[in-house]
Amino acid sequence: MFGPEPIQLRSIVLVLGPGMARGFAHAGALRALVAAKIPIAAVVGSEMGAFIGTLYAMEGNINHLDWALLRFKDEVFLPQQGLLNGLFSDRAGGGKLGAELRRAFGEKELSQCKVPSKIVLGTDSGAPLLVDGGRAWEAVRAALTPPRSQEAIEWSGQRVFAATSVRPFPVSEARALGLGPVVVIDVSLPGKAAPWEAALKEADLVIRPELKGIGEKDYSKRSEAAFRGKRAVSENLPAVRQWVGLPQEGLSP
């Protein structure tokens, strides 16, 4: 007798979508996944999901993510004079947000992430652009730049910006990696993901944290958003564990 065969685990590909301040729920979701020892093969993000996801993926360490987020004060994200271009006072440096991103990532490239990180950007052509190389801070800055903004930068000869209007949930890009089941964290406002329901149906699991009372500009509630993101993943852990191939808690393998 050689005992039971070892469990064959599958890693998930995590898709983190847009939501601005509501996107801090992604940080809580990641904490819950890491605490439950759910293996993450890659993170594919757009807008705030690209920011949170890449911060985690760079070191693949949840403590590093928590520490890094503390350095981003609420006012860095808040618009000035009603426009987001207050964040981007100059194209080269990216203004306040760009400076903080550069301090967080340094000159590291996306290809150096411990957990593969890919960012989906919008382009003037209307076709999404999947980015997995180049300087991380610039890619994340582009992911947070509003569509049609004068502060959009060039990447591979194209103007790039947040993919919220062209591919907010890069499920097909995540699926194409062929690394494992695709799990989406959707933190968008109620009804805002409706045009993308067909794309979301391609995911193996969609987790929607209950974020009632938290708007896209409510950065003062970022801790609450993170808590609710963690709770949502915890409530969905049986389904996640099933996709990964882990036995349910309390049951023998």
Image: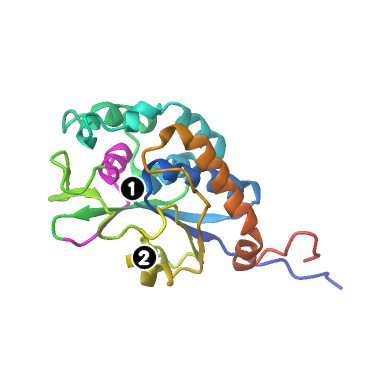
Which span of residues is magenta-colored? Answer: 126-144
Q: Residue at coordinates 56% horizontally, 34% vertically from top-left? A: 63
Q: Residue at coordinates 75% horizontally, 70% vertically from top-left? A: 5
Residue type, label 1: Glu
Which residue ends up furthest to the right in the rendered image?
1
| The label number, if any, that marks residue 213 in the structure image | none
Q: Quadrant of residue 10?
A: bottom right
* 221 or 242: nearer the viewer: 221
Residue type, label 2: Ala
Q: Is residue 61 visible?
A: no
Residue on which the image places disc 1: 47
- Asked whether, in this view, residue 230 is left or right of residue 103, the answer is right
Colour pattern: rainbow
Label 1 crowd bin: few (<14), some (14–19), many (20+), radius 10 Å: many
Relative to 54, residue 234 above or below? below
Q: Is residue 129 magenta?
A: yes
Q: Report x, y in % for residue 219.
A: 41, 34
**Which of pointers 2 and 1 indicates the residue nearer the eye?**
2
- Element type where label 2 sits in the image: helix
Q: Earlier in the sequence, mark 2 or mark 1?
A: 1
Q: Quadrant of residue 95?
A: top left
Q: Report x, y in % for residue 240.
A: 60, 62
Q: Is residue 146 visible?
A: yes
Q: Quadrant of the N terminus?
A: bottom right
Q: Residue at coordinates 25% horizontally, 43% vertically from top-left? A: 142
Whether the residues at callouts 2 and 1 have beta carbons within 8 Å, the answer is no
* 201 or 90: nearer the viewer: 201
Q: Residue at coordinates 29% horizontally, 54% vertically from top-left? A: 164
Q: Is residue 7 magenta?
A: no
Residue on which the image places disc 2: 194
